[in-house]
Amino acid sequence: MELRDVPDVVRLHRADLSQGFFVELGERFLTRYYRTYLTSPAAVALIAELGDELAGFLVGCTDVRVHRRHVVKLERWRLARAGAASLLLRPDLTARFVRTRAQRYARGIRAAGTTEGTSRRTGVLNHIAVRQALRRCRVGSALVSGFVDIAKVHGVEQLVLQTEQDNEAAHRLYADLGWKRGAPVRDAEGKTWTPFVLDL
């Protein structure tokens, strides 16, 4: 992924991953969010193209702690400004943010410089989306396989991701690629997700 790809990535995110909190924060926030994957030393940002058009994308990281530190130290104020503009216009969204995310984000900022947690080097597949017309053309498989290959080169020992609980197509994709399904988890807003883990 390059900087010129970000507008198309944001459009595909808004179309394909439309239920997320980040989408509600608006295009400006999403644009700034995806730019963090172009500047972080631990980030992976891949696109698949069909001709000159975006077919799909994947973003993740090869080291959760390194990527988090990068975002907190170098990008947090840009992200905060972009998000605040939307929150100021949406009191309902602000109330939800305070209720479900504010404390968790504050803890994440405080912990960004620490090395607490697992000693295994863990990477995360954060977002993947494929244009609807191309979903049976193995675009998603190619993106995930590319991410796994990059993670191996960087010495990652384990990859993790979460999918929507009812997204059976995604569950089949990851199972076919060797990922192990975990027990469902609930987020701060009460939504249930299905985790997958891949040991490398």
Image (cartoon, helix red, strand yellow):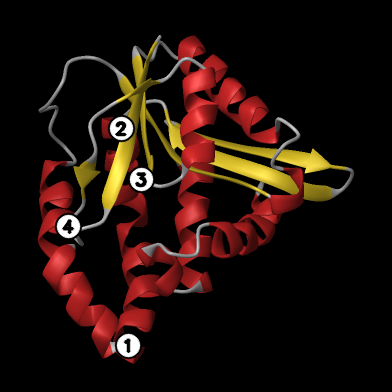
At which x and y percent is residue 38?
54, 44
Which mark identifies residue 90?
Answer: 1
Is 68 situated left or right of 27 in this image?
Answer: left
Q: CA distance from mark 1 to mark 4?
A: 19 Å
Residue 82 higher or lower than 101, as above or below: below
The x and y percentages for residue 95 are 18, 80
Q: Earlier in the sequence, mark 2 or mark 1?
A: 2
Question: Compared with residue 148, is residue 79 higher up or lower down, i.e. above or below?
Answer: below
Horizontal and vertical percent for residue 184?
24, 38
Question: Disc 2, disc 1: CB below 8 Å?
Answer: no
Mark closest to the chain's N terminus, 2 or 3? 2
Q: Which mark is residue 165?
A: 3
- Does the image show residue 59? no
Nearer to us of marks 4 and 2 is 4
For marks 3 and 1, give the one nearer the viewer. Answer: 3
Frontmost residue, 178 versus 55: 178
Disc marking residue 188: 4
User: Across the whole image, how many numbered discs are drawn on residues?
Assistant: 4
Residue that appears at 11% across and 48% down: 110
Question: Which residue type carries mark 2?
Answer: Val
Q: CA distance from mark 3 to mark 1?
A: 28 Å
Q: Secondary structure at mark 4?
A: loop
Give the labeled residue for mark 2: 64
Q: Earlier in the sequence, mark 4 or mark 2?
A: 2
